[in-house]
Amino acid sequence: MSYMTNVTLEEVQHLATLSSLQLSDDEATSLSRDISNILDYINQLDELDTEGVEPTYQVTDLSNVWRDDVAVDSSVSREELLSLSKDQLDNQVKVPKVL
């Protein structure tokens, strides 16, 4: 089965705008061709018979080692830590708003 995915220049420019990128016409043309080739390659995977194939989550046979989340008493008081902050409000470190 042959696939031919065509990504238009308008689609590439739209993706560039969403990504806050400025592309020249040559760059957009090249990306259009590259993205189309990548999608064609990915579409080839639809032809594979994966019936009965178990998903692979990781290949190293390592597992996560978890520890209990336990509060540890510190020799440093809250007041000492707050005194290190540039700004504080209501007994908390005040940081700039990030939107």
Image (cartoon, helix red, strand yellow):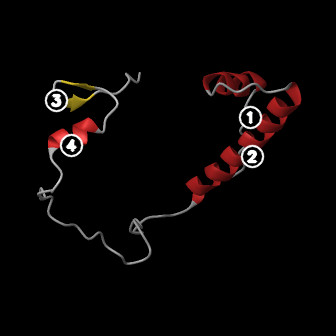
Q: What element carries label 3?
A: loop
- In the foreground, 5 or 63: 63
Residue type at mark 4 is: Glu
Q: What element carries label 1?
A: loop
- Say whether disc 4 or disc 3 marks the residue closer to the N-terminus: 4
- The residue identified by callout 3 is 91
Q: Is residue 79 above or below residue 50?
A: above
Q: What element carries label 2?
A: helix
Disc 4 and disc 3: Cα gap in Å? Answer: 11 Å
- The residue identified by callout 2 is 37
Residue 73 percent location from the top left of the image: 11, 57
Viewer can see residue 8 = yes
User: Residue at the location (31% across, 26% down)?
Assistant: 87
- The residue identified by callout 4 is 80
- Say whether disc 2 or disc 1 marks the residue closer to the N-terminus: 1
Disc 1 and disc 4: Cα gap in Å? Answer: 62 Å
Classify mark 4: residues with Cα within 10 Å, few (<14), some (14-19) or many (20+): few
Residue type at mark 1 is: Asn
- In the foreground, 89 or 79: 79
> Which marked residue is nearer to the observer: mark 2 or mark 3?
3
* Horizontal arrangement in the rendering, residue 10 relative to residue 78 (left or right): right
Q: Are marks 2 and 4 in contact (CB under 8 Å)?
A: no
- The residue identified by callout 1 is 6
Disc 2 and disc 3: Cα gap in Å? Answer: 57 Å
Q: Do the residues labelled 2 and 3 touch (CB within 8 Å)?
A: no
Residue type at mark 3 is: Asn
Q: In this view, does 64 lie above or below 26?
A: below
- In the foreground, 82 or 65: 82
